[in-house]
Image (spheres, helix red, strand yellow):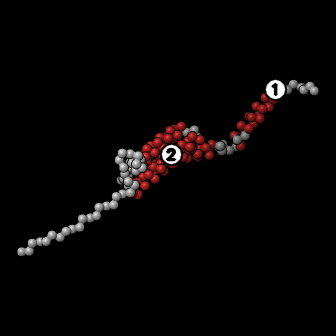
Amino acid sequence: MTEQPKDWDKELANIDRAMAKQSATPASTGAPGVQTAPRRRLIALAWFWTVLGLVLGIALLLWPYDKNCGIRLIFFLGAALLAVLMAVLGAFASWAHRQGLAMLLSLIVIVWAGVMGAREILPRAGYAREARGWTCPAPAPAPTPTTSPTPQQ
């Protein structure tokens, strides 16, 4: 059985035409921007999560309330956790959409919020020299007024 030799130039030309037809199909649909609209929205969402994490990270530095104990400590740690979560979402989204600056900012916020949370958690976990409690100490009882006898005249 003898086969006829193939014309490889024709075969490669057919493959090139098929590839060109596949890459030209989305652009020839008549709807420009069909592929870019979801991508733009996802990039905007990645930047939203990054900026939200950045704002929360800055808010941790400027926290206006006392965070030594009790419910205020819980709110501060919740804000730190929320900042880390938003930055992680921003990091994943910016990684998927190749947004370098957003990725860098997200990683900085993750480290920053983690350090701010660790500053409050570690002394309460017994890891630091100075031990702090999770709950606030009970307030000292108010002194009872003593009546001193007044001299009678």
Amino acid tagged 1: Trp
Asked if the residue under mark 2 is in contact with the one under mark 1, i.e. CB atoms within 8 Å, the reply is: no
What residue is rendered at 34% in x and 58% in y? 137
Helix, strand or loop status at disc 2: helix
Point out which mark residue 103 bears. Answer: none
Front residue of this view, candidates 153 and 130: 130
- Whole-Å distance between the Cαs marked 1 and 2? 53 Å
- In percent of width and height, residue 98 lies at 57, 38
Residue located beneath label 2 in the image: 87
Circle 2 packing at 10 Å, graded few (<14), some (14-19), many (20+), is: many
Q: Nearer the viewer, mark 1 or mark 2?
A: 2
User: Hey, which residue is sitting farthest left in the picture?
Assistant: 153
Q: Quadrant of the N terminus?
A: top right
Give me the residue at 33% from left, 60% from top: 138
Looking at numbered disc 2 in the image, what kind of residue is underneath it? Ala
Give the left or right position of residue 116, taking residue 49 as reference. Answer: left
Q: Position of residue 28 (x, y in %)?
A: 71, 40
Mark 1 — residue? 8
Residue closer to the observer: 93 or 134: 134
As drawn, 73 above or below 29: below
